[in-house]
């Protein structure tokens, strides 16, 4: 089981920014695709974006709802993947999770094998 830990969540006003981190222990993140997901109360978990492994040149893909506002990057030296969130909106409020697998596929949560515990992001209007 791959261990992932998210951090960086918090309370921010609409229009503000947050950077979430996804740190791995016991394995090298660079060999895995890392997806970011979120789940708001009463809603299904949805994909936010994904970064492919370094072997696949770390290409990224994003949900339409966050394109142009969110950016995923990886720092292999720190064994960490980041989710930079700008221009936050109240509808971005959710628990955010990172997850690892061999590829991003279609950013379907069930396709990802290992998950972090999540970090809460709350955007006030």
Image: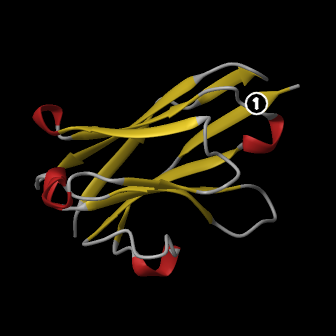
**Secondary structure of residue under mark 1:** strand
Residue at position x 22%, y 70% in the image: 1
Name the quadrant containing residue 11: top right
Between 114 and 105, the one lying in front of the other is 105
From the viewer's perspective, tell me whether residue 121 is left or right of residue 25: right
| Residue 14 coordinates in the image, percent (x, y) | 79, 23
Residue, far right = 125
From the viewer's perspective, tell me whether residue 82 is left or right of residue 80: right
| Residue 117 coordinates in the image, percent (x, y) | 45, 53
**Rendered view: 119 above or below 49:** above
Between 2 and 107, the one lying in front of the other is 107
**Rendered view: 112 above or below 57:** below
Residue at position x 48%, y 80% in the image: 110
Residue at position x 22%, y 62% in the image: 32
Name the quadrant containing residue 38: bottom right
From the viewer's perspective, tell me whether residue 100 is left or right of residue 110: left
Between 2 and 71, the one lying in front of the other is 71
Residue at position x 61%, y 40% in the image: 120
Q: Is residue 116 visible?
A: no
Q: Is residue 101 visible?
A: yes
| Residue 12 coordinates in the image, percent (x, y) | 70, 21
Which quarter of the rendered picture does the C terminus lie within? top right
**Rendered view: 121 above or below 53:** above
- Quickly name the residue at label 1: 123
């Amino acid at each position: 089981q791959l261990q992932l830990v998210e951090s960086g969540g918090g309370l921010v006003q609409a229009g503000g920014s947050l950077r979430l981190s996804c740190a791995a222990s016991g394995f090298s993140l660079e060999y895995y695709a890392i997806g970011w997901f979120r789940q708001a109360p009463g809603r299904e978990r949805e994909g936010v974006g994904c970064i492919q492994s370094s072997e696949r040149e770390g290409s990224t893909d994003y949900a339409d709802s966050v394109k142009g506002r969110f950016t995923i990057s990886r720092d292999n030296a720190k064994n960490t993947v980041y989710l930079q969130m700008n221009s936050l909106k109240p509808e971005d409020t959710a628990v955010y999770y990172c997850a690892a697998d061999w590829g991003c596929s279609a950013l379907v949560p069930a396709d990802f094998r290992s998950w972090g515990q999540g970090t809460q992001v709350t955007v006030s209007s």
